[in-house]
Amino acid sequence: MAYFPDIPHVRYEGPSSKNPFAFKHYNPDEIIEGKSMRDHMRFGAAYWHVMRNGLSDPFGGATALMPWDDQSSSVDNALKRADVFFEFLEKIDIDYYCFHDRDIAPELNDLAKSTAALEKVTAHLKELQNAHGKKLLWGTACLFSHARFSQGAATSPSADVFAYAAAQVKAAMDSTLALGGEGYTFWGGREGYSTLLNTDMKRELDHLAALLHLAVDYAKKIGFKGQFYIEPKPREPSTHQYDSDAAACLNFLRQYGLMGHFKLNLETNHATLAGHTMLHEMTVAIDADSLGSVDANQGDELIGWDTDQFPTDLYLTTGIMQKVLEMGGFTTGGLNFDAKRRRESHEPEDLFHAHIGGMDAFARGLKAAAAIRADGRMADFVAKRYDSWNSGIGAKVEAKSVTLEELSTYALGNGEPTIGSGRQEMLENLLNEFI
Ligand code: XUL
Ligand code: CO
Protein backbone atom coordinates (compact mmCIF):
# COMPACT_ATOMS: atom_id res chain seq x y z
CA MET A 1 0.00 0.00 0.00
CA ALA A 2 1.38 3.38 -0.97
CA TYR A 3 0.70 6.15 1.51
CA PHE A 4 2.61 8.74 -0.52
CA PRO A 5 1.42 7.71 -4.00
CA ASP A 6 2.48 10.91 -5.75
CA ILE A 7 5.96 11.16 -4.25
CA PRO A 8 8.82 9.51 -6.13
CA HIS A 9 11.94 8.02 -4.54
CA VAL A 10 14.14 11.03 -3.84
CA ARG A 11 17.49 10.73 -5.61
CA TYR A 12 20.53 12.89 -6.25
CA GLU A 13 20.14 14.87 -9.49
CA GLY A 14 22.80 17.55 -8.98
CA PRO A 15 22.72 21.33 -8.52
CA SER A 16 21.10 22.08 -11.88
CA SER A 17 18.02 19.91 -11.21
CA LYS A 18 14.71 21.76 -10.91
CA ASN A 19 12.91 18.75 -9.44
CA PRO A 20 11.68 19.63 -5.93
CA PHE A 21 11.76 15.91 -5.05
CA ALA A 22 15.47 15.51 -5.83
CA PHE A 23 18.64 16.13 -3.87
CA LYS A 24 20.73 18.90 -5.40
CA HIS A 25 23.73 18.39 -3.12
CA TYR A 26 23.26 15.25 -1.01
CA ASN A 27 24.86 12.54 -3.07
CA PRO A 28 24.92 9.58 -0.67
CA ASP A 29 27.73 7.72 -2.43
CA GLU A 30 30.04 10.69 -3.00
CA ILE A 31 33.30 10.26 -1.11
CA ILE A 32 34.51 13.14 1.03
CA GLU A 33 37.61 12.82 3.20
CA GLY A 34 37.66 9.11 2.46
CA LYS A 35 34.07 8.36 3.50
CA SER A 36 30.70 8.43 1.74
CA MET A 37 28.32 11.29 2.48
CA ARG A 38 25.83 8.72 3.76
CA ASP A 39 28.33 7.50 6.35
CA HIS A 40 29.39 10.98 7.39
CA MET A 41 25.84 12.15 8.02
CA ARG A 42 24.06 9.09 9.41
CA PHE A 43 20.79 10.99 8.92
CA GLY A 44 17.90 10.09 11.17
CA ALA A 45 14.20 10.96 11.08
CA ALA A 46 12.28 11.67 14.30
CA TYR A 47 9.18 9.48 14.63
CA TRP A 48 7.52 12.06 16.89
CA HIS A 49 7.70 14.82 14.32
CA VAL A 50 7.08 12.81 11.14
CA MET A 51 4.26 10.63 12.43
CA ARG A 52 2.86 12.24 15.57
CA ASN A 53 3.19 15.98 15.25
CA GLY A 54 -0.13 17.50 14.21
CA LEU A 55 1.59 20.91 14.10
CA SER A 56 -0.56 22.52 16.79
CA ASP A 57 0.79 25.56 18.63
CA PRO A 58 -0.30 27.32 21.84
CA PHE A 59 -2.94 29.23 19.86
CA GLY A 60 -4.45 26.59 17.63
CA GLY A 61 -4.94 22.90 17.03
CA ALA A 62 -3.48 20.41 14.60
CA THR A 63 -3.33 21.23 10.90
CA ALA A 64 -1.27 18.31 9.53
CA LEU A 65 -3.11 16.01 7.15
CA MET A 66 -2.52 12.38 8.08
CA PRO A 67 -5.08 10.45 6.05
CA TRP A 68 -3.64 7.13 7.27
CA ASP A 69 -4.21 7.93 10.96
CA ASP A 70 -7.65 7.28 12.52
CA GLN A 71 -6.52 9.29 15.61
CA SER A 72 -7.41 6.38 17.89
CA SER A 73 -5.16 4.89 20.58
CA SER A 74 -5.49 1.45 19.06
CA VAL A 75 -2.50 -0.77 18.48
CA ASP A 76 -3.71 -1.29 14.90
CA ASN A 77 -3.45 2.44 14.26
CA ALA A 78 0.07 2.41 15.73
CA LEU A 79 1.09 -0.52 13.50
CA LYS A 80 -0.27 1.23 10.43
CA ARG A 81 1.64 4.41 11.28
CA ALA A 82 4.84 2.38 11.39
CA ASP A 83 4.16 1.17 7.83
CA VAL A 84 3.67 4.76 6.69
CA PHE A 85 6.88 5.84 8.44
CA PHE A 86 8.97 3.16 6.74
CA GLU A 87 7.56 4.08 3.34
CA PHE A 88 8.65 7.63 4.14
CA LEU A 89 12.18 6.52 5.16
CA GLU A 90 12.47 4.43 2.02
CA LYS A 91 11.42 7.24 -0.33
CA ILE A 92 13.51 9.95 1.35
CA ASP A 93 16.54 7.60 1.62
CA ILE A 94 17.13 8.15 5.34
CA ASP A 95 18.82 5.19 7.03
CA TYR A 96 18.10 5.84 10.72
CA TYR A 97 15.23 6.84 12.96
CA CYS A 98 14.63 7.78 16.60
CA PHE A 99 11.54 7.39 18.77
CA HIS A 100 9.95 7.81 22.17
CA ASP A 101 8.05 4.80 23.50
CA ARG A 102 4.78 6.74 23.37
CA ASP A 103 5.34 7.91 19.77
CA ILE A 104 5.43 4.40 18.40
CA ALA A 105 2.86 2.85 20.74
CA PRO A 106 -0.15 4.28 22.59
CA GLU A 107 -0.28 5.53 26.17
CA LEU A 108 -3.13 3.44 27.55
CA ASN A 109 -3.19 4.83 31.10
CA ASP A 110 -2.29 1.39 32.38
CA LEU A 111 1.37 0.48 32.64
CA ALA A 112 0.97 -3.21 31.81
CA LYS A 113 -1.25 -2.48 28.80
CA SER A 114 0.98 0.32 27.49
CA THR A 115 4.04 -1.95 27.83
CA ALA A 116 2.30 -4.79 26.01
CA ALA A 117 1.37 -2.40 23.19
CA LEU A 118 4.98 -1.23 23.00
CA GLU A 119 6.18 -4.80 22.68
CA LYS A 120 3.72 -5.46 19.85
CA VAL A 121 4.74 -2.40 17.89
CA THR A 122 8.42 -3.14 18.55
CA ALA A 123 8.04 -6.56 16.95
CA HIS A 124 6.46 -4.93 13.90
CA LEU A 125 9.19 -2.29 13.69
CA LYS A 126 11.76 -5.06 13.71
CA GLU A 127 10.14 -6.65 10.67
CA LEU A 128 9.98 -3.29 8.94
CA GLN A 129 13.65 -2.54 9.72
CA ASN A 130 14.66 -5.86 8.18
CA ALA A 131 12.43 -5.43 5.13
CA HIS A 132 13.65 -1.90 4.41
CA GLY A 133 17.25 -2.10 5.65
CA LYS A 134 16.74 0.73 8.18
CA LYS A 135 18.30 1.14 11.62
CA LEU A 136 17.46 2.65 14.97
CA LEU A 137 19.79 5.51 15.95
CA TRP A 138 18.33 5.79 19.45
CA GLY A 139 15.25 5.16 21.49
CA THR A 140 13.91 7.00 24.51
CA ALA A 141 10.99 7.09 26.93
CA CYS A 142 8.53 9.96 26.94
CA LEU A 143 8.63 11.05 30.59
CA PHE A 144 7.13 14.49 30.11
CA SER A 145 3.74 14.42 28.33
CA HIS A 146 1.45 12.58 30.72
CA ALA A 147 -0.02 14.43 33.72
CA ARG A 148 1.72 11.98 36.08
CA PHE A 149 5.02 13.58 35.02
CA SER A 150 3.84 17.17 35.39
CA GLN A 151 6.22 17.66 38.35
CA GLY A 152 9.08 15.66 36.87
CA ALA A 153 9.82 11.98 36.32
CA ALA A 154 13.14 10.99 37.96
CA THR A 155 13.00 14.35 39.78
CA SER A 156 9.37 14.11 40.83
CA PRO A 157 8.65 14.73 44.51
CA SER A 158 6.78 11.40 44.38
CA ALA A 159 8.77 8.17 44.66
CA ASP A 160 5.87 6.34 42.97
CA VAL A 161 6.22 8.56 39.91
CA PHE A 162 9.97 7.80 39.93
CA ALA A 163 9.17 4.09 39.92
CA TYR A 164 6.69 4.53 37.05
CA ALA A 165 9.32 6.44 35.06
CA ALA A 166 11.86 3.70 35.79
CA ALA A 167 9.40 1.09 34.50
CA GLN A 168 8.96 3.07 31.29
CA VAL A 169 12.75 3.40 30.88
CA LYS A 170 13.14 -0.36 31.37
CA ALA A 171 10.52 -1.11 28.71
CA ALA A 172 11.95 1.50 26.30
CA MET A 173 15.44 0.03 26.76
CA ASP A 174 14.09 -3.46 26.09
CA SER A 175 12.50 -2.16 22.92
CA THR A 176 15.67 -0.31 21.88
CA LEU A 177 17.75 -3.44 22.44
CA ALA A 178 15.30 -5.60 20.47
CA LEU A 179 15.61 -3.17 17.56
CA GLY A 180 19.42 -3.10 17.65
CA GLY A 181 19.38 0.58 18.64
CA GLU A 182 22.80 2.23 18.60
CA GLY A 183 21.94 4.58 21.44
CA TYR A 184 19.49 5.50 24.17
CA THR A 185 18.70 9.13 25.04
CA PHE A 186 17.57 10.90 28.18
CA TRP A 187 16.05 14.30 27.56
CA GLY A 188 14.93 15.74 30.89
CA GLY A 189 11.81 17.51 29.67
CA ARG A 190 10.36 18.13 33.12
CA GLU A 191 13.46 17.27 35.13
CA GLY A 192 13.70 20.73 36.61
CA TYR A 193 11.47 23.11 38.50
CA SER A 194 9.00 25.91 38.25
CA THR A 195 9.83 27.53 41.60
CA LEU A 196 12.44 26.89 44.29
CA LEU A 197 9.74 27.66 46.88
CA ASN A 198 8.63 24.03 46.64
CA THR A 199 11.81 22.32 45.41
CA ASP A 200 14.64 20.37 47.06
CA MET A 201 17.10 20.68 44.20
CA LYS A 202 19.86 18.54 45.73
CA ARG A 203 17.51 15.66 46.40
CA GLU A 204 16.00 15.86 42.90
CA LEU A 205 19.44 15.80 41.27
CA ASP A 206 20.43 12.79 43.39
CA HIS A 207 17.32 11.02 42.12
CA LEU A 208 18.05 11.91 38.49
CA ALA A 209 21.54 10.43 38.86
CA ALA A 210 20.04 7.37 40.55
CA LEU A 211 17.81 6.68 37.54
CA LEU A 212 20.74 7.04 35.13
CA HIS A 213 22.85 4.64 37.22
CA LEU A 214 19.97 2.16 37.28
CA ALA A 215 19.76 2.38 33.48
CA VAL A 216 23.51 1.79 33.15
CA ASP A 217 23.24 -1.26 35.43
CA TYR A 218 20.26 -2.60 33.51
CA ALA A 219 22.07 -2.15 30.18
CA LYS A 220 24.86 -4.40 31.49
CA LYS A 221 22.34 -6.98 32.63
CA ILE A 222 20.52 -7.23 29.29
CA GLY A 223 23.60 -6.79 27.11
CA PHE A 224 22.65 -3.40 25.66
CA LYS A 225 25.92 -2.08 24.20
CA GLY A 226 24.52 1.15 22.73
CA GLN A 227 25.65 4.61 23.78
CA PHE A 228 23.70 6.50 26.43
CA TYR A 229 23.13 10.20 25.77
CA ILE A 230 21.83 13.15 27.76
CA GLU A 231 20.28 15.94 25.72
CA PRO A 232 20.71 19.41 27.24
CA LYS A 233 17.99 22.05 27.13
CA PRO A 234 17.64 24.97 29.56
CA ARG A 235 13.88 25.45 29.73
CA GLU A 236 10.57 24.81 27.99
CA PRO A 237 8.65 23.00 29.29
CA SER A 238 10.22 23.56 32.75
CA THR A 239 11.15 27.06 33.85
CA HIS A 240 14.59 25.73 34.72
CA GLN A 241 15.77 22.34 33.52
CA TYR A 242 18.67 20.69 35.32
CA ASP A 243 20.37 19.55 32.09
CA SER A 244 20.54 23.17 30.98
CA ASP A 245 23.54 23.13 28.66
CA ALA A 246 26.56 21.03 27.73
CA ALA A 247 28.71 22.35 30.58
CA ALA A 248 25.96 21.75 33.18
CA CYS A 249 25.43 18.19 31.87
CA LEU A 250 29.14 17.41 31.96
CA ASN A 251 29.40 18.74 35.52
CA PHE A 252 26.43 16.58 36.54
CA LEU A 253 27.91 13.48 34.89
CA ARG A 254 31.28 14.07 36.59
CA GLN A 255 29.71 14.75 39.99
CA TYR A 256 27.73 11.53 39.92
CA GLY A 257 30.36 9.23 38.39
CA LEU A 258 28.52 8.85 35.08
CA MET A 259 31.11 10.37 32.71
CA GLY A 260 32.25 7.10 31.16
CA HIS A 261 28.68 5.98 30.49
CA PHE A 262 27.12 9.00 28.82
CA LYS A 263 27.79 11.32 25.91
CA LEU A 264 25.79 14.34 24.87
CA ASN A 265 23.11 14.57 22.21
CA LEU A 266 23.24 18.25 21.28
CA GLU A 267 20.36 20.07 19.62
CA THR A 268 20.84 23.39 17.85
CA ASN A 269 17.66 25.06 19.07
CA HIS A 270 18.41 23.99 22.65
CA ALA A 271 21.87 25.57 22.39
CA THR A 272 20.36 28.89 21.34
CA LEU A 273 17.71 28.71 24.09
CA ALA A 274 20.65 28.32 26.50
CA GLY A 275 22.17 31.52 25.16
CA HIS A 276 24.92 29.69 23.28
CA THR A 277 25.64 28.83 19.71
CA MET A 278 25.54 25.19 18.59
CA LEU A 279 29.24 25.47 17.83
CA HIS A 280 29.94 26.56 21.39
CA GLU A 281 28.04 23.56 22.74
CA MET A 282 29.77 21.19 20.31
CA THR A 283 33.18 22.57 21.27
CA VAL A 284 32.47 22.12 24.99
CA ALA A 285 31.37 18.52 24.37
CA ILE A 286 34.18 17.58 21.98
CA ASP A 287 36.84 18.98 24.31
CA ALA A 288 35.50 16.63 27.01
CA ASP A 289 35.43 13.73 24.53
CA SER A 290 31.68 13.66 25.02
CA LEU A 291 29.95 14.58 21.78
CA GLY A 292 27.75 11.66 20.86
CA SER A 293 25.01 12.75 18.50
CA VAL A 294 23.21 15.77 17.08
CA ASP A 295 19.53 16.69 16.96
CA ALA A 296 19.65 18.74 13.79
CA ASN A 297 17.33 21.72 13.56
CA GLN A 298 17.45 25.49 13.93
CA GLY A 299 15.50 28.15 15.81
CA ASP A 300 14.02 31.44 14.72
CA GLU A 301 15.60 34.51 16.26
CA LEU A 302 12.37 36.49 15.86
CA ILE A 303 10.33 34.01 17.90
CA GLY A 304 12.66 32.84 20.65
CA TRP A 305 11.11 29.51 21.62
CA ASP A 306 11.93 25.97 20.55
CA THR A 307 10.57 26.25 17.01
CA ASP A 308 12.44 23.10 15.86
CA GLN A 309 12.77 24.28 12.28
CA PHE A 310 14.53 22.32 9.60
CA PRO A 311 18.18 23.37 9.27
CA THR A 312 18.73 25.44 6.15
CA ASP A 313 21.40 27.89 7.33
CA LEU A 314 24.63 27.02 5.52
CA TYR A 315 26.83 28.77 8.07
CA LEU A 316 25.29 26.54 10.71
CA THR A 317 25.60 23.29 8.75
CA THR A 318 29.15 24.14 7.69
CA GLY A 319 30.15 24.83 11.29
CA ILE A 320 28.50 21.65 12.56
CA MET A 321 30.20 19.51 9.90
CA GLN A 322 33.56 21.16 10.61
CA LYS A 323 33.18 20.08 14.24
CA VAL A 324 32.05 16.58 13.27
CA LEU A 325 35.06 16.16 10.95
CA GLU A 326 37.35 17.60 13.61
CA MET A 327 36.28 14.94 16.10
CA GLY A 328 36.82 12.18 13.55
CA GLY A 329 33.15 11.63 12.65
CA PHE A 330 30.18 10.07 14.40
CA THR A 331 30.51 6.58 15.82
CA THR A 332 27.14 5.66 17.34
CA GLY A 333 25.55 9.07 16.71
CA GLY A 334 24.25 10.88 13.67
CA LEU A 335 22.22 13.84 12.46
CA ASN A 336 18.70 13.25 13.68
CA PHE A 337 16.20 15.75 12.27
CA ASP A 338 14.45 16.74 15.47
CA ALA A 339 12.55 19.24 13.36
CA LYS A 340 9.00 19.92 12.33
CA ARG A 341 7.34 21.61 9.40
CA ARG A 342 5.68 24.98 9.92
CA ARG A 343 2.04 24.77 10.89
CA GLU A 344 1.03 26.05 7.48
CA SER A 345 3.01 23.29 5.70
CA HIS A 346 0.33 20.76 6.50
CA GLU A 347 0.34 18.47 3.47
CA PRO A 348 2.16 15.11 3.51
CA GLU A 349 4.50 16.18 0.69
CA ASP A 350 5.84 18.93 2.97
CA LEU A 351 7.50 16.20 5.03
CA PHE A 352 9.63 15.47 1.98
CA HIS A 353 10.49 19.09 1.16
CA ALA A 354 11.51 19.65 4.76
CA HIS A 355 13.88 16.69 4.96
CA ILE A 356 15.28 17.24 1.47
CA GLY A 357 16.16 20.80 2.48
CA GLY A 358 17.88 19.68 5.68
CA MET A 359 19.83 16.93 3.92
CA ASP A 360 20.96 19.22 1.11
CA ALA A 361 21.96 21.94 3.59
CA PHE A 362 24.09 19.43 5.50
CA ALA A 363 25.61 18.12 2.26
CA ARG A 364 26.67 21.66 1.34
CA GLY A 365 27.95 22.11 4.90
CA LEU A 366 30.00 18.93 4.66
CA LYS A 367 31.53 19.94 1.32
CA ALA A 368 32.35 23.42 2.59
CA ALA A 369 33.81 22.05 5.82
CA ALA A 370 36.03 19.60 3.94
CA ALA A 371 37.16 22.39 1.60
CA ILE A 372 38.02 24.66 4.54
CA ARG A 373 40.06 21.86 6.07
CA ALA A 374 41.84 21.08 2.79
CA ASP A 375 42.63 24.77 2.30
CA GLY A 376 44.18 24.94 5.75
CA ARG A 377 44.36 28.74 6.12
CA MET A 378 41.79 28.84 8.92
CA ALA A 379 43.50 26.14 10.99
CA ASP A 380 46.93 27.69 10.30
CA PHE A 381 45.73 31.04 11.59
CA VAL A 382 44.49 29.55 14.84
CA ALA A 383 47.65 27.48 15.31
CA LYS A 384 49.86 30.55 14.73
CA ARG A 385 47.76 32.62 17.12
CA TYR A 386 48.92 30.34 19.95
CA ASP A 387 52.53 30.10 18.75
CA SER A 388 53.96 31.61 21.93
CA TRP A 389 52.92 28.45 23.79
CA ASN A 390 55.08 26.18 21.66
CA SER A 391 58.44 27.19 23.12
CA GLY A 392 60.02 29.33 25.83
CA ILE A 393 57.90 30.47 28.75
CA GLY A 394 54.61 29.25 27.19
CA ALA A 395 55.89 25.71 26.79
CA LYS A 396 57.07 25.77 30.40
CA VAL A 397 53.59 26.79 31.63
CA GLU A 398 51.95 24.06 29.56
CA ALA A 399 54.44 21.53 30.92
CA LYS A 400 53.66 22.75 34.46
CA SER A 401 57.39 23.28 35.02
CA VAL A 402 57.37 26.87 36.18
CA THR A 403 56.55 28.72 39.42
CA LEU A 404 54.68 31.97 39.95
CA GLU A 405 57.97 33.61 41.05
CA GLU A 406 59.72 32.52 37.83
CA LEU A 407 56.87 33.96 35.77
CA SER A 408 57.15 37.21 37.69
CA THR A 409 60.89 37.42 37.04
CA TYR A 410 60.28 36.63 33.35
CA ALA A 411 57.58 39.31 33.00
CA LEU A 412 59.69 41.92 34.80
CA GLY A 413 62.56 41.35 32.35
CA ASN A 414 60.36 41.08 29.27
CA GLY A 415 58.82 44.56 29.00
CA GLU A 416 55.30 45.28 27.71
CA PRO A 417 53.96 42.28 25.70
CA THR A 418 52.83 42.84 22.14
CA ILE A 419 49.91 40.91 20.69
CA GLY A 420 48.79 40.37 17.09
CA SER A 421 45.31 41.14 15.73
CA GLY A 422 42.54 38.56 16.15
CA ARG A 423 41.60 39.26 12.47
CA GLN A 424 37.95 38.36 13.00
CA GLU A 425 36.78 40.20 9.88
CA MET A 426 39.49 38.65 7.73
CA LEU A 427 38.46 35.21 8.97
CA GLU A 428 34.79 35.93 8.32
CA ASN A 429 35.73 36.88 4.77
CA LEU A 430 37.76 33.69 4.48
CA LEU A 431 34.77 31.62 5.68
CA ASN A 432 32.59 33.30 3.05
CA GLU A 433 34.97 32.10 0.33
CA PHE A 434 33.65 28.59 1.05
CA ILE A 435 29.94 29.17 1.59
C1 XUL B 1 12.50 18.32 22.96
C2 XUL B 1 13.43 17.37 22.33
C3 XUL B 1 13.07 15.93 22.48
C4 XUL B 1 14.26 15.02 22.59
C5 XUL B 1 13.90 13.59 22.86
O1 XUL B 1 12.85 19.64 22.80
O2 XUL B 1 14.39 17.75 21.70
O3 XUL B 1 12.28 15.56 21.42
O4 XUL B 1 15.05 15.06 21.46
O5 XUL B 1 13.12 13.43 23.97
CO1 CO C 1 15.85 16.77 20.58
Image (cartoon, rainbow, N blue to C red):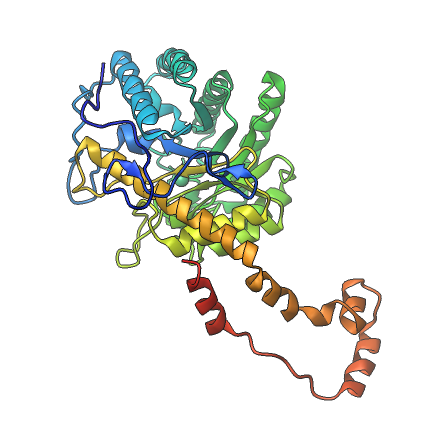
The image quarter containing residue 25 is: top left
Q: Closest to the observer: 297 or 191? A: 297
Image quarter where the N terminus lies is top left
Residue 266 coordinates in the image, percent (x, y): 47, 44
Residue at 55 percent of width and 47 percent of height? 325
Q: Quadrant of ligand 1?
A: top left
Left or right placement of residue 365 versus residue 345 in this view: right
Q: Closest to the observer: 149 or 366? A: 366
Number of numbered discs visible in the structure rendering: 0
Residue at 26 percent of width and 55 percent of height? 303
The image quarter containing residue 76 is: top left
Judge whether residue 340 can be spotted in this image: no
Q: Is residue 373 above or below residue 35?
A: below
Residue 282 coordinates in the image, percent (x, y): 52, 50
Residue at 16 percent of width and 30 percent of height? 65
Residue 369 coordinates in the image, percent (x, y): 49, 52
Left or right placement of residue 262 versus residue 105 in this view: right
Residue 105 coordinates in the image, percent (x, y): 33, 19
Q: Closest to the observer: 331 or 368? A: 368
The image quarter containing residue 116 is: top left
Image quarter where the C terminus lies is bottom left
Q: Is residue 232 above or below residue 274?
A: above
Judge whether residue 99 can be spotted in this image: yes
